[in-house]
Image (cartoon, rainbow, N blue to C red):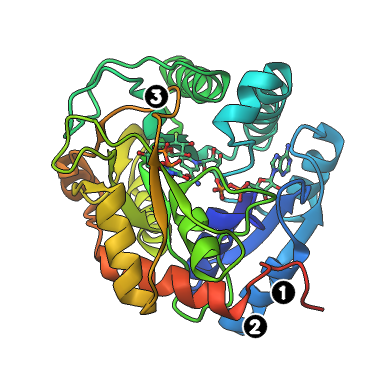
Amino acid sequence: MKILVTGGAGYIGSHTCLALLNEGYEVVIVDNLCNSSIESIKRIEILANQSVIFYNADVRDMVSLENVFHENSIEAVIHFAGLKSVNESINIPINYYENNVGSSIALFNIMSKFNCKILVFSSSATVYGDTAMSPIKEGSQLSANNPYGRSKLMIEEILQDLYVSDDTWHIGRLRYFNPVGAHKSGMIGEDPNGIPNNLFPYISQVAVGRRKKVNIFGGDYDTHDGTGVRDYIHVMDIADGHIKALEALNIKSQLLTINLGTGNGYSVLDVIKAFESASGLKIPYKIVGRREGDIASCYADTALASSSINWNASYNLESMCKDAWKWQTLNPNGYQKIG
Ligand code: NAD
Ligand code: UFG
């Protein structure tokens, strides 16, 4: 089965492409490399010992996209392409709506034209806003408090309308919690530009000596140790969730909306401790003020993922830290400096 993976050179996309190849799928990637490197694709090919078809193109470019569908018999699409920084989205909202919503509309149009109706879309736990009670069920009320989150919510709604208009579509809306870690080889991983916004890459860069200490945003939350609690999930579990979703969607048309999380909440201090034990290093940190927009606690109810697509997360926090650390030590500067 030939799968188009938009954003396949990126963090989650690259791990999912590798998992797809290992499961015997053929992979076509469309990525404009605006937040990734061609090196990740080369490494996927080495790890899988197979090649992928790569188009350096913007998903919003309908002429290129149409060409991809003309040249390949695409049977299903996994749509990762998009911009993902909450902070950046507040400063340049139009770019976020244009890229995330615009690329999705272009893609869904071309898919309709080629009668390709199996789609898995990368949504986010951010669509639950800041009022949902953890463990969060898929039926919880939705809201978003920044342009990035609103762009995800808009695309979810577009997909709902699309399915209502034509129930021969097979649509998966996967709401990821906090994807972290890397493939166990340490050859592919998360490679953020500039100063990382997210906890895991920040801790990794402190451990490897690129940054002095972790600033913990808030020590006075109503959690077991006062620091923010999240549902960290290994990126290879996320990749596997896409394969399970594809399998379920392939069987019947439906609109599937599921959480991809472990169901466990860990605090910032828990993560630092686990990372120290995985790396054997002391991670210096300082508790500073809360970060605007953060909530105390956010973790998934995973029952629906388990019952509907037979998927359960299998990696624990220790493996997430171990694999993130291996990637960081083998690639202290990400993909950048390797030829
Ligand atoms: P990423 O930035 O590493 O990957 C996204 C990829 O899409 C990049 O390779 C980028 O170059 C490409 N891209 C962006 N806009 C494009 C366009 N218009 N045309 C072609 N390519 C384009 O991000 P990621 O962490 O791998 O996230 C993948 C998806 O999952 C995103 O949609 C993101 O919003 C969503 N998501 C991520 C997280 C997370 O914490 N990483 C959490 C929830 C949801
Ligand atoms: N944190 C720190 N210091 C840091 C970075 C983060 O203390 O340097 C804390 C945060 O305050 C939070 C926790 O670590 O308590 C996790 O923060 P991240 O930035 O790693 O992740 P978020 O939960 O804030 O957000 C992530 C993605 C969003 C996505 C959301 C839900 O960045 O895009 O998960 O999927 F919407």
| Foreground residue among 228 and 88 | 228
Q: Which residue appears at 69% of the width and 56% of the height?
A: 29
Query: Would you name the residue on which mark 1 appears?
Result: 42
Q: Is residue 298 above or below residue 73?
A: above
Between residue 268 and residue 286, name the one nearer to us.
Answer: 286
Residue located beneath label 3 in the image: 127
Three-letter amino acid code of the residue under disc 2 = Ile
Disc 1 on helix, strand or loop? helix
Task: For residue 59, say whether it is visible.
Answer: yes
Quarter of the view holding residue 10: bottom right
Marks 3 and 2 sit apart, C-alpha to C-alpha, by: 36 Å
Q: In the image, ligand 1 is in what quadrant?
A: top right
Quarter the C terminus occupies? bottom right
Instruction: Give how far apart the Cα atoms at labels 1 and 3 are.
Output: 33 Å
Q: Residues within 10 Å of mark 1 (few under 14, many from 20)?
A: some
* Residue 91 as seen in the image, left or right of residue 294: right
The answer to whether residue 109 is left or right of residue 174 is right
Q: CA distance from mark 2 to mark 1?
A: 6 Å
